[in-house]
Amino acid sequence: MLDPRPHLGEPLALDLLNTRWIDNGPQDLLTDTAGLGAWLDSAGLAHRSSADERTLEAVLAARTAIYDVVKHSTVSGLNDVLEYGRVRRTLTSAGPTDIDDVADPAWLPAWLAADNLLRLLTEAPDRIRQCAHPDCVLFFYDTSKNGTRRWHSMATCGNRAKAARHYAKKV
């Protein structure tokens, strides 16, 4: 199954949130293991995890926890997901390295997404945004120079908003 989502390429935590979108009504990629497989593949995790029911349950728990942090500043669910793993620091011949240490493989993608949210919150929490279009539910990490991006995509939501403003002026 190909990933049918309209917006890809965000950091892992936001990419997981973007498994729900609006296209002729609400859509959800994670309704079954086939959709999970598509997400794992597009997120570059297919080689690290299998698309089974246990992984789907873990990823859905992580998606809810990440949403609760981003939209409501509720942290308990995210901390529950983070309990499934840790970062182990080690020294190799190539130098210091961090190793993701998740005992239960079904929780690896969920834990990686939760850990990614921590990194985004550390770097620039104000750059985690939801698209400003009132009919859009997608999220993005604002990488613009001045940090004022409003749309997940100027080609879709940005243009719709500009066209609506233009139409409103003519009426």
Image: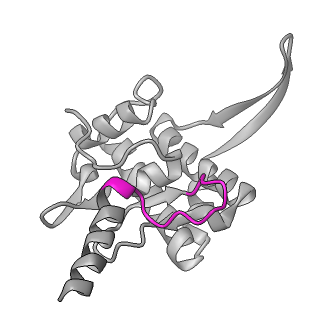
92 on left or right of 70: right
Residue 53 is inside the magenta segment: no
What is the span of residues highlighted in magenta in the rendered image? 142-155
Q: Residue at x 74, y 57 (%)?
A: 122
Between 144 and 166, the residue placed more toward the observer is: 166
Q: Kindly indicate the quadrant of the structure image that contains residue 17.
A: bottom left
* Residue 2 visible in the displayed image: yes
On the image, the x and y values in percent for residue 110 come to 49, 47
Judge whether 112 appears above or below 114 on screen.
above
Q: Residue at x 45, y 31 (%)?
A: 45
Judge whether 142 appears above or below 53 on screen.
below
Q: Residue at x 83, y 13 (%)?
A: 94
Q: Main secondary structure of the magenta part?
A: loop
Question: What residue occupies the far bottom of the structure in this picture?
Answer: 171
48 on left or right of 88: left
Judge whether 58 appears above or below 51 on screen.
below
On the image, the x and y values in percent for residue 3 come to 26, 39
Q: Residue at x 54, y 69 (%)?
A: 70
17 on left or right of 170: right
